[in-house]
Amino acid sequence: MSENTATPKRSRTPMDLGFMDVESLQRYVTDSGKIQPRRFSGLTPKQQRHISRQVKRARQLLLMK
């Protein structure tokens, strides 16, 4: 009777990422710590602004470099 009630994994879009998702945000940061430009990350302008804000928030809280 009881089925698997675990929520299915859905694909995470950049708009779903928050500042606490440090591992996922690392994808949009270079090895030297700079935020990748849109031409390399392939994000839309709205997504790029969102990612930039989240990376900056994570940096302020010392969650990432």
Image (spheres, rainbow, N blue to C red):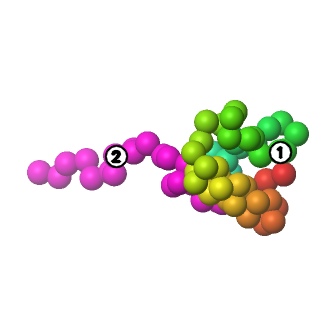
Q: Which of marks 2 and 1 is in front?
A: 1
Q: Give the x, y percent position of residue 56.
A: 76, 60
SS at circle 1 = loop
10 Å crowding of disc 1: few (<14), some (14-19), many (20+): few
Residue closest to the far top: 40
Q: Which residue is drawn at 88% across and 39% down?
A: 32
Residue closest to the far right: 32
**What kind of secondary structure does the magenta stretch mostly adopt?**
loop
Foreground residue, 39 or 2? 39
Please give the label number shown on residue 34. Answer: 1
Q: Which residue is drawn at 25% across and 47% down?
A: 4
Q: Dividing the picture into quarters, in which one does residue 20 lie?
A: bottom right
* Tag 2 residue: 8
Q: Residue at x 32, y 51 (%)?
A: 6
Nearer-N-terminus badge (2/1)? 2
Magenta stretch, residue numbers? 1-21
10 Å crowding of disc 2: few (<14), some (14-19), many (20+): few
Residue closest to the far left: 1
Looking at the image, how many numbered discs can be counted on the residues?
2
Q: Give the x, y percent position of residue 5.
A: 27, 52
Q: Is residue 2 magenta?
A: yes
Whether residue 32 sits left or right of residue 27 in the image: it is right
SS at circle 2 = loop
